C-alpha cells in the first residue's frame, strides 16, 4: 500500500510540474478562446457599493423510498437582505410561514425517482423567485446551483413525470422573461461546478493542456488571480442549423425564452476556488453584477460566497425528526420500506 501511495504522489507531482509549465506559457500570451464575448480572458473585478435589496433562494429536501411509493419533503426559503451604504439594514424571509411541502408519487423507476426529487426542488425555488419578482421584494435574486435543470433531470416523454418537467420549463421561461422585463438581476452561483465549458475550449486551442485538467474549476484555480473574472461565454452556442444540443435550452426556446444565458467564473480570494456564475443579465451589465457579487462575498476570504445564500441554506434545512414523523405515519398506512432500509446490518 505504501508503495502504491508513493507512486500516486509521484504521478501527481509530475502532473503539477507539467501544469506549471503550461500555465507559464499561457500567461506569456494573450489567451483567446472560441466563444469569448469580451476582448480579455481575465478581467479585474471592482467592488460595487451595496445599496439594494438582495434575495438568496435555496431549498432542501428529504425523501423516503417505500416498496410501492416515494415520499418527498421539500422546503424552499428566500433570505432577503436590505443594504444601504454597504451596511446590512434589515433581514426578512419569504414565505413568512416557512412550511414543508409533502409530495407523494407511486410507481417510479430509479431514474424517475432522481428526476422526481430534482424537478420538485427546482419548481419550489422557481415559484418563490417568481413571487419575489411579482411583488417587487428584491432588486437582485440569487439561486444556489445551476440556473437551469441538468439534462439528466429531463424524464422520457412517456414518463408520468413529463408533465411536471414541462411545467417546470414553462415556469422557468416565464421567470427569465419577467426578470428581464422588470430589470431585475437574476443569477445563480455554482460553488462546486464540474462543468468543462472553458477547459474544453482551451484544450482545442492549446495542445499542452491536454491530459492535465478535467474541469474548469481545476484549470481556473491554477490560472486566475484573486479579484478577477473570466470573459463571458454563452451557456451553449446554437449549432449551425440554429438548434441547441442541450435539451433544456431547446425546451426553454420552445417556451419563448430566446435570450442568452451568460456564464463566467469569479476568483475572489487565493484561499478559495473560483465560483461559476450563470445569469440572464445582459453582457453590458456583467461588470456591475460581478462587482455586487464581490462585495456580497467579501465577508470571508476562505469561503467566498454571499451571506444571503448561506442564510437561506440554513433556514431551508429540514430536521430529520420531521421526516421520521411522516415515515411513522405512512408506515401505519401499510407502506413498507425497502429491504435495503430494513436490513439488520450496515
Image: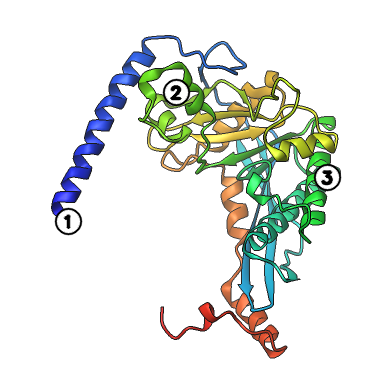
The one nearer the camera, 144 or 91, is 144
Mark 2 and mark 3 residues within 8 Å of each other at the beta carbon: no
Instruction: Pinpoint residue 290: horizontal percent, then vertical percent.
Output: 59, 27
Q: CA distance from mark 2 to mark 3?
A: 36 Å
Q: Quadrant of residue 212?
A: top left
For marks 2 and 3, the one nearer the N-term is 3
Choose mark 2 or mark 3, whichever is in front. Answer: 2
Q: Point out the frontmost of discs 3 and 1.
A: 1
Neighbour tally class for label 2: few under 14, some 14-19, many 20 plus, Cα within 10 Å: some
Q: What percent of the width, then of the height, locates residue 108? A: 69, 67
Quadrant where the N terminus is found in the figure:
bottom left
Percent x, y of residue 42:
49, 18
Residue 63 occupies which quadrant of the picture? bottom right
Q: Is residue 224 left or right of residue 138?
A: left
Q: Residue at x 34, y 14 (%)?
A: 25
In front of the other: 172 or 58: 172
Residue at numbered disc 2: 203
User: Taking 135 as reference, is 328 left or right?
Assistant: left
Mark 3, residue position: 170
Helix, strand or loop for disc 3: helix
Crowd class of label 3 (few under 14; some 14 to 19; many from 20; radius 10 Å): some
Relative to residue 250, is residue 57 drawn left or right? Answer: left
State which quarter of the image contains the C terminus. Answer: bottom left
Dot placed on the residue nearer the N-terminal end, 3 or 1: 1
In percent of width and height, residue 129 lies at: 76, 47
Q: Name the residue rendered at 38%, 15% in the picture.
A: 26
Q: Residues within 10 Å of mark 1 (few under 14, many from 20)?
A: few
Q: Which label belongs to residue 165? A: none
In the displayed structure, 13 sits above or below 231; it is below
Q: Which residue is mark 1?
A: 1
Amino acid at each position: 500500500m505504501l508503495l502504491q501511495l508513493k507512486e500516486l504522489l509521484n504521478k501527481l507531482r509530475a502532473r503539477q510540474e507539467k501544469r506549471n509549465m503550461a500555465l507559464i506559457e499561457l500567461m506569456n500570451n494573450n489567451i483567446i478562446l472560441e466563444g469569448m464575448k469580451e476582448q480579455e480572458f481575465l478581467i479585474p473585478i471592482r467592488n460595487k457599493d451595496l445599496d439594494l435589496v438582495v434575495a438568496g433562494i435555496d431549498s432542501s429536501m428529504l425523501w423516503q423510498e417505500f416498496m410501492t411509493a416515494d415520499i418527498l419533503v421539500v422546503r424552499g426559503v428566500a433570505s432577503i437582505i436590505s443594504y444601504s451604504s454597504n451596511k446590512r439594514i434589515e433581514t426578512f424571509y419569504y414565505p413568512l410561514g416557512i412550511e414543508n411541502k409533502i409530495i407523494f408519487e407511486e410507481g417510479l423507476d430509479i431514474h424517475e425517482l432522481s428526476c422526481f426529487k430534482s424537478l420538485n426542488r427546482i419548481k419550489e425555488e422557481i415559484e418563490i423567485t417568481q413571487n419575489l419578482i411579482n411583488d417587487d421584494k428584491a432588486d437582485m435574486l440569487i439561486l444556489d446551483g445551476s440556473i437551469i435543470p441538468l439534462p439528466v433531470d429531463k424524464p422520457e416523454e412517456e414518463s408520468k413525470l413529463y408533465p411536471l418537467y414541462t411545467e417546470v420549463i414553462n415556469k422557468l421561461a416565464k421567470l427569465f422573461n419577467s426578470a428581464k422585463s422588470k430589470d431585475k438581476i437574476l443569477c445563480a452561483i455554482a460553488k462546486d461546478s464540474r462543468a468543462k465549458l472553458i477547459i474544453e475550449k482551451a484544450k482545442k486551442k492549446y495542445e499542452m493542456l491536454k491530459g492535465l485538467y478535467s474541469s474548469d474549476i481545476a484549470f481556473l484555480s491554477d490560472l486566475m488571480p484573486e479579484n478577477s473574472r473570466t470573459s463571458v461565454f454563452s451557456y451553449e452556442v446554437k449549432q449551425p442549423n440554429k438548434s441547441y444540443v442541450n435539451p433544456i435550452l431547446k425546451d426553454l426556446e420552445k417556451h419563448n425564452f430566446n435570450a442568452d444565458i451568460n456564464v463566467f467564473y469569479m476568483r475572489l480570494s487565493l484561499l478559495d476556488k473560483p465560483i461559476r456564475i450563470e445569469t440572464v443579465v445582459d453582457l453590458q451589465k456583467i461588470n456591475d453584477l460581478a462587482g455586487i457579487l464581490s462585495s456580497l462575498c467579501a465577508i470571508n476570504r476562505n469561503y467566498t460566497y454571499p451571506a444571503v445564500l448561506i442564510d437561506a441554506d440554513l433556514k431551508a434545512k429540514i430536521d430529520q425528526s420531521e421526516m421520521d414523523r411522516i415515515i411513522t405515519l405512512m408506515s401505519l398506512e401499510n407502506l413498507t420500506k425497502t429491504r435495503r432500509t430494513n436490513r439488520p446490518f450496515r
